Image (cartoon, rainbow, N blue to C red):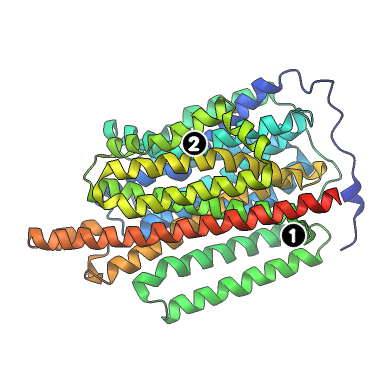
């Protein structure tokens, strides 16, 4: 692909010495915005039992409530980033906050699974605008020397929101009905919107790329089809016509997306980026780190409530050690010092290896109660605190500065796609294992327990669920470990090539 004139467009006006005078306050506002979006990725997990009871939601409904948000968001992130570069990052950030607030209102008042899924998809549109512009604005207001620290803080807040979603959800469900987990977004969105309008400077590249609408449609359809095939596998059978046709659609559409992106002059993602080992290594590691973390939290919150018998708030509190490790290591600067001392490749590789060890330890000892799970949560938090900021910085460093919006879109797409795929794949593995040991007609663990006619039968059902959980977590651990090895190796080769 030839370089277009837009690729050589002028950057935003030069920053004064030391960056924007209010850059740290602006970063706080940006973190508030992204915290709301990331929380919504996991806050729904602890509401699964409530939604199952009050809306009559089946397992596939629950997964679509989670994935409708992440899939729409991941499908639109690249287009949103390109539009932000062209039309103004502040405008897109404000629009995203407004759409996210309205979607939260509709979701909080929904009275059926269909309405909630549709509202979650609408929230995904606002979330796409938010996630792609937050990191782009941060890149614009900080000097190159301060960008790694700013990205580290952003990544820490991102991880914190991801991990504390179950805690917030548990607190809300302990005091209010399930719709409150969405309505709480509204005052935060309003506050962030006012702060963005007052504080955040406008930045854009007037000659930037055109939005790639067809690419957005293809990527959204392709990923939705892929996840739908994975979700439907346990229910309809992996060799059923419905699953095979959906999987074929996913393969064809995603291949068409890659072909389209490699041929047009204004792609959402330049396929030549994948020739950059730093970019490829960071993206592959980013997908798998969120795959393992998102899927494991989805499974663990169900295990704590259904099997161990904790209330929603108790389940949220018992996932807190993961978040506490991320906060302690990032906001004290310990994780940044480790990463600087080890170097990016080794920091990412070791961080993901520690995460994998945490997932594996939970798989081995989860059936024995919470004590054994605690060690796994601490290990996952420690690994994520080191690996996630290094991963985000590696991705943004591989993208030209004038493409900051697209870079933020790629980073967000990696996180959203990895999380959605983790929930779908690990959830499907759990369901497949569970369905092989209990009547398929039960549809879910609560349904199977309701049909049990003896304590022995209930014990057999819980053992089946625990067995499925163990298998799923071990698969997640293996994926994270392999991701760390691949990402570390590619980044190491990229560093050596740069030196040469």
Rendering coords of residue 321 (x, y %): 40, 35
**Is 145 on the left or on the right of 186, as rendered?**
right
Between marks 1 and 2 in the image, the one whose residue lies nearer the viewer: 1
Residue found at x 77% / y 22%:
20
- Furthest toward the left, the residue is 454
Do we see residue 331 in this rendering?
Answer: yes
Mark sitting earlier along the chain (1/2):
2
Q: Is residue 291 above or below residue 24?
A: below
* Quadrant location, the N terminus: bottom right
Work out whether residue 164 or residue 187 is closer to the camera in this orientation and state it: 164
Q: Which dot marks residue 274?
A: 1
Q: Which dot marks residue 161?
A: 2
Q: In the figure, residue 215 lies in which quadrant? A: bottom right
Q: Which dot marks residue 60?
A: none
Residue found at x 45% / y 67%:
230
Q: SS at mark 1? A: helix
Residue found at x 75% / y 43%:
397
Q: Residues within 10 Å of mark 2 (few under 14, many from 20)?
A: many
Q: SS at mark 2? A: helix
Q: Is residue 125 above or below residue 227?
A: above
Q: Is residue 344 above or below residue 449?
A: above
In this figure, what is the number of numbered marks?
2
Do we see residue 182 in this rendering?
Answer: no
Q: What is the CA distance from the residue labelled 1 to the residue labelled 2? A: 29 Å
Work out whether residue 93 or residue 21 is closer to the camera in this orientation and state it: 21
Rendering coords of residue 155 (x, y %): 59, 37
Rendering coords of residue 57 (x, y %): 31, 56
Work out whether residue 101 or residue 500 is closer to the camera in this orientation and state it: 500
Work out whether residue 160 or residue 249 is closer to the camera in this orientation and state it: 160
Rendering coords of residue 122 (x, y %): 52, 48
**Is 357 on the left or on the right of 205, as rendered?**
left
């Amino acid at each position: 692909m030839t370089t277009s004139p837009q690729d050589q467009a002028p950057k935003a006006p030069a920053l004064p010495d030391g960056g924007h005078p209010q850059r740290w306050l602006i970063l706080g506002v940006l973190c508030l915005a992204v915290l709301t979006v990331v929380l919504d990725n996991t806050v729904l997990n602890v509401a699964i039992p409530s939604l199952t009871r009050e809306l009559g939601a089946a397992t596939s409904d629950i997964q679509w409530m989670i994935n409708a948000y992440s899939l729409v968001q991941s499908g639109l992130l690249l287009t949103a980033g390109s539009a932000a570069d062209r039309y103004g990052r502040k405008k897109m950030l404000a629009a995203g906050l407004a759409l996210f607030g309205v979607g939260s209102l509709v979701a909080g008042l929904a009275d059926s699974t269909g309405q909630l899924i549709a509202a979650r998809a609408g929230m995904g549109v606002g979330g796409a605008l938010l996630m792609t512009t937050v990191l782009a604005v941060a890149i614009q207001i900080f000097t190159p020397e301060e960008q790694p620290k700013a990205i580290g803080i952003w990544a820490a807040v991102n991880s914190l929101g991801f991990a504390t979603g179950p805690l917030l959800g548990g607190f809300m469900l302990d005091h209010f009905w399930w719709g409150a987990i969405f309505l709480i977004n509204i005052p935060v969105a309003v506050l962030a919107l006012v702060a963005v309008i007052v504080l955040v400077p406008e930045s854009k590249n007037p000659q930037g790329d055109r939005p790639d609408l067809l690419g957005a449609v293809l990527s959204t359809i392709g990923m939705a089809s892929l996840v739908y095939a994975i979700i439907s596998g346990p229910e309809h059978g992996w060799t059923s016509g419905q699953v095979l046709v959906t999987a074929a659609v996913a393969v064809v559409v995603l291949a068409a997306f890659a072909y389209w992106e490699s041929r047009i002059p204004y792609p959402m993602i330049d396929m030549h980026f994948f020739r950059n080992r730093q970019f490829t290594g960071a993206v592959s590691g980013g997908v798998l780190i969120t795959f393992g973390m998102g899927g494991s939290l989805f499974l663990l919150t169900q295990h704590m409530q259904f099997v161990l018998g904790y209330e929603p708030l108790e389940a949220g509190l018992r996932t807190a050690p993961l978040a506490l490790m991320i906060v302690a290591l990032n906001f004290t600067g310990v994780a940044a010092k480790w990463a600087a001392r080890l170097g990016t490749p080794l920091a990412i590789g070791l961080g993901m290896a520690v995460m994998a060890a945490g997932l594996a330890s939970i798989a081995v000892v989860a059936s024995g109660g919470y004590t054994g799970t605690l060690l796994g949560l601490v290990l996952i938090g420690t690994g994520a605190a080191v690996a996630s900021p290094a991963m985000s910085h590696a991705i943004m460093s591989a993208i030209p500065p004038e493409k900051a919006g697209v870079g933020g879109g790629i980073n967000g797409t990696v996180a959203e796609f990895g999380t959605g795929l983790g929930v779908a794949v690990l959830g499907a593995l759990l369901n497949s294992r569970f369905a092989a040991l209990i009547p398929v007609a039960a549809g879910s663990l609560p349904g199977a327990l309701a049909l049990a006619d003896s304590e022995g039968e209930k014990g057999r059902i819980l053992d089946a669920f625990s067995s499925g959980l163990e298998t799923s977590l071990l698969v997640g651990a293996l994926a994270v470990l392999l991701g760390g090895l691949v990402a570390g190796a590619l980044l190491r080769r990229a560093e050596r090539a740069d030196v040469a």
